[in-house]
Amino acid sequence: MPSIAELRRVTQPEAVLGRANAEHWAGRLYMRRLSPYVTRTLLATRMSANAVTWLMFPSGLLAGLALTLPGVAGPIGAVLLAQLQLLMDCCDGEVARWRGTYSPAGIFLDRLAHHVTDAALAVGLGIRADGGWNSLGGWTTIGCLIAIIGLLIKAETMLVPLSRTAAGRDLAPDSRATAAPRAGLLRRLRRTIGFLPFFRALVTMELTLLALAAAVVDVLAGDLVGTRVLVAALVPVAGVTLLGHLAAILASDRLR
């Protein structure tokens, strides 16, 4: 079996982790420190990298389901399940790089898992705001709307390499310089927004933490005010992110 140092050298190269959109902050902060130990255990089994990726689906769906439970236990479970998914997200690529089995199928499954998870969390949060499965109503509809907008945001990102390939061009470098808008005003606006990344409220890790904070407010208030305020706030956040992301793509070098 490889040592942890060997695993880090082969499976966590700077060429991968140094990409502009390669890592979630939690991955850089602590999960990449833990993942080699789990990866080393997985390498001792017959599990393929894609099999590890498949584990991201139940953890994501269960996180969305956990948000529908009353009290704070459900959101705590959602946070823990989001951590588990992030761990699997780190380990599947590490297993693939060590074994040399990195494949388009693995990338597809990985991205699909994130799509499914983020949508499930938004819908689950809407169900929670309505009071649970026995009282589905307008808040659930809003949760579904947030899920749809979130999927459209992801579609904007996914359409960039697809469009370049269809036009017969190579993939654009995954760098901050390529993603930065060419226009000075948009560039400054994007840099300013970076100091207050409200758009990350739709990402799995951040959304589960926000849902937990809202659940604490619910318990203290004795009603669902925290969750409902969060769901209501996510609608304009999602709308602004959708339009802003589109403008940033069109104003950058990603499609040139």
Image: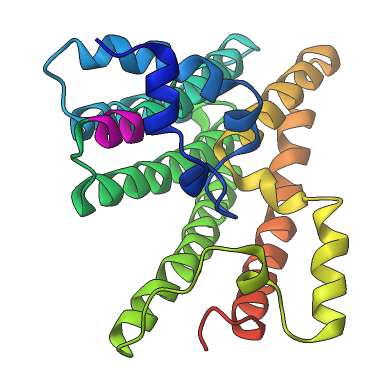
- Please say whether residue 243 is one of the residues in the magenta stretch: no
Quarter of image, res 225: top right
The N terminus: image quadrant: top left
How many numbered marks does the figure carry?
A: 0
| Extent of the magenta region | 92-98
Say if residue 135 shows up in the picture. yes
Q: Is residue 28 above or below residue 116?
A: above
Residue that appears at 60% across and 19% down: 75
Instruction: Choose between 234 and 54: the one closer to the eye.
Output: 54
Instruction: Choose between 16 and 45: the one closer to the eye.
Output: 16
**Relative horizontal placement of residue 93, taking residue 99 as reference (left or right):** right
Quarter of image, res 52: top left
Q: Position of residue 32 (x, y in %)?
A: 52, 25
**Relative horizontal placement of residue 124, taking residue 212 as reference (left or right):** left
- Please say whether residue 94 is one of the residues in the magenta stretch: yes
Colour style of the rendered protein structure: rainbow
Q: Is residue 134 above or below residue 138?
A: above
Q: Is residue 174 above or below residue 128?
A: below
Instruction: Choose between 52 and 119: the one closer to the eye.
Output: 52
Residue that appears at 28% across and 28% down: 95
Q: Position of residue 140 (x, y in %)?
A: 54, 43
Q: Position of residue 38 (x, y in %)?
A: 37, 13
Say if residue 60 shows up in the picture. no
Quarter of image, res 228: top right
Residue that appears at 64% across and 81% down: 252
Label the magenta part by its dominant secondary structure: helix
Q: Position of residue 193 (x, y in %)?
A: 83, 60
